[in-house]
Image (cartoon, helix red, strand yellow):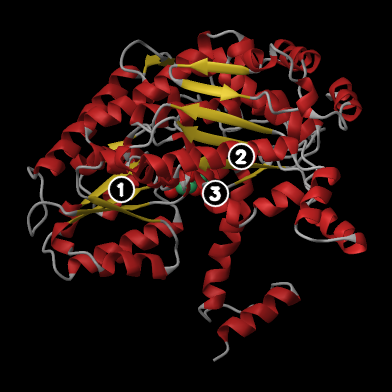
Amino acid sequence: MFSELKDKFSSVADRRIETLFDKTRVAIFCAETDGLFFDYSKTNIDLETLDKLFEIVKNTSVLDKRDAMFSGEKINVSENRAVLHTVLRKSSGQVFVDGEDVMPAVLETRTRIFNFAEAVRTGKIRGQGGVYTDVVNIGIGGSDLGPAMAYLALQPYVTGPKCHYVSNIDGAQIHDVLADLNPETTLIIVASKTFTTIETLTNAKTAFSWMSNIVSEPATQFVALSSAKEKTSEFGIPDNHLFGFEDWVGGRYSLWGPIGLSLVIAIGKEHFCDFLNGGFSMDDHFQNSKINKNLPIILALIGIWHAQIGGHTTRAVLPYEQRLSRLPAYLQQLEMESNGKGVGIEGEELLTTSGPIVWGEPGTNGQHAFYQLIHQGTHVVPCEFMIAKQSHESHLKHHHELLQANCLAQSQALMSGRNIAAARTMAASAGFVGKELERQAHQMVFQGNRPSTTLVYQKLTPFCLGQIIALYEHRVFVEGVILGINSFDQWGVELGKDLATKLSPVLAGREPATQYDLSTQNLITKLCSK
Ligand code: F6P
């Protein structure tokens, strides 16, 4: 697979990216939609390569699968489900699953969510002690990362109660969060699609008993976001406090619907609608713009060029935006749970590497931590920079100018590096001579020629956040189709869950450890000894 492109990659490996810049390059190696501008001129992709990459899209089922996804076909074949998180961002039209139009139910649930959130915000719905001051969202994975990331990203729009996010089964987290809260004015949201996730149920029970000590009817201060109605009522959550969604919304794609409730409570329905509209705008762009100007397709092809063709196994997401500090974690689930698979759709072994390892931190913090390796280490890490034209803090304009300068400086340094001649001049001006000058100069060489892309957006508004998230969702989708992966199941997380359930009574001393391998037995002994 990709053999021609792999040959091309090797043949241009030593070519300097800078030599590709003629008068037309910056105008060609970019794409734009609704205020988002994506530059990929600082990659070692030339026009011939670009054509070949676009050929991949034409020769695979990307466009057919895209249309199948939007129209409600069951493209998640291993679970026999449609993939319709895109419906959650629509406000009209019809989409059929098993012969039934799903839009009316989506719109009805959205209205219920908006009404509930508005009532919480205005104090019409309140706790035993009065207006809700705090909301605790208990969930994990897709039931946590999306709302937690977006709540932080959209802080300038938060006008509702304070939201807190508890995900880890480590009791330290729920302990620390609840320690500062008043049970009488706290709303607990239990977010779990399946309502079987042990972390979430354990935390929910802990929160319930914390509340029961003070509040006479704790269930009235609980809300469930789930597809499992029977299980939520078994837990004791009243039906009018359940906001459901269908199995065609994957956990890591669920922020747009009920799982976004804490965000709606925090920012209000108008801003949440802007967020949905941003996602919808990207859906429209993905469906209707030409392949060679289609942002999700271009991002996916660059990803494939670097990972599967070039063999760079990781990529860094580097938002120069402190409020996007949870975006890399969010994208880790989105990308790695979706495409971290070694088996194709038909159960065949993948003939290429799976989706890459995704990681990152906001700039400029990352610069003072791991950028050393990005610049001078032996691994090539393709970097995806993100930067706003404007910040929300207009009174701190000089901060933003420095932030932008740092972002551009990094992509420039990655591409251009510093050659030995320049390093020698630097060493000489620092007073070094002879052998010591040579030794010092070699430490200061940056090979450069390291690829990066830059996404520029106007300002981190709800609309813009919606665009960015949908952009990455569709990028993951396109990469998955090209690799022949089903991006919508996640069998890789199941085995560990099973084993943990079996190990729990062993650690509690209720069952013997003898069935385990010697290393695990030894660790059990260490953990259980006084
Ligand atoms: O980690 C696996 C996973 O199934 C994710 O896909 C999902 O987002 C998370 O667990 C939480 O699942 P649930 O919402 O059902 O509690």
Q: Earlier in the sequence, mark 3 or mark 2?
A: 3
Residue kind at label 1, given as amino acid type: Thr
Q: Position of residue 437 (x, y in %)?
A: 86, 59
Compare residues 345 and 404 and report the one nearer the observer.
Answer: 404
Q: Amino acid at mark 2?
A: Ala
Residue labelled 1 has its Cβ within 8 Å of some atom of ligand 1: no
CA gap, disc 1 to disc 3? Answer: 36 Å
346 or 103, which is in the foreground?
103
Mark toward the start of the polypeptide (1 vs 2): 1
Q: Is residue 133 visible?
A: yes
Which percent across, then down, holds residue 194? 42, 45
**The disc label shown at residue 409, or none:** 2
Q: CA distance from mark 3 to mark 2?
A: 17 Å
Determine whether, in the image, residue 84 is placed left or right of residue 383.
Answer: left
| Quadrant holding the N terminus | top right
Q: Residue at x 57, y 52 (%)?
A: 366
Give the alpha-carbon distance from disc 1 to disc 2, as whole Å: 51 Å
Q: Is disc 3 surrounded by few (<14), some (14 to 19) or many (20+) residues within 10 Å?
A: many
Secondary structure beneath disc 3? Answer: loop
Residue at image mark 3: 361
Residue 31, position as x, y percentages in the image: 57, 17
* Residue 19 found in image quarter: top right
Q: Nearer the viewer, mark 1 or mark 3?
A: 3
Callout 3–callout 2 Cβ contact below 8 Å: no
Q: Residue at x 87, y 63 (%)?
A: 436
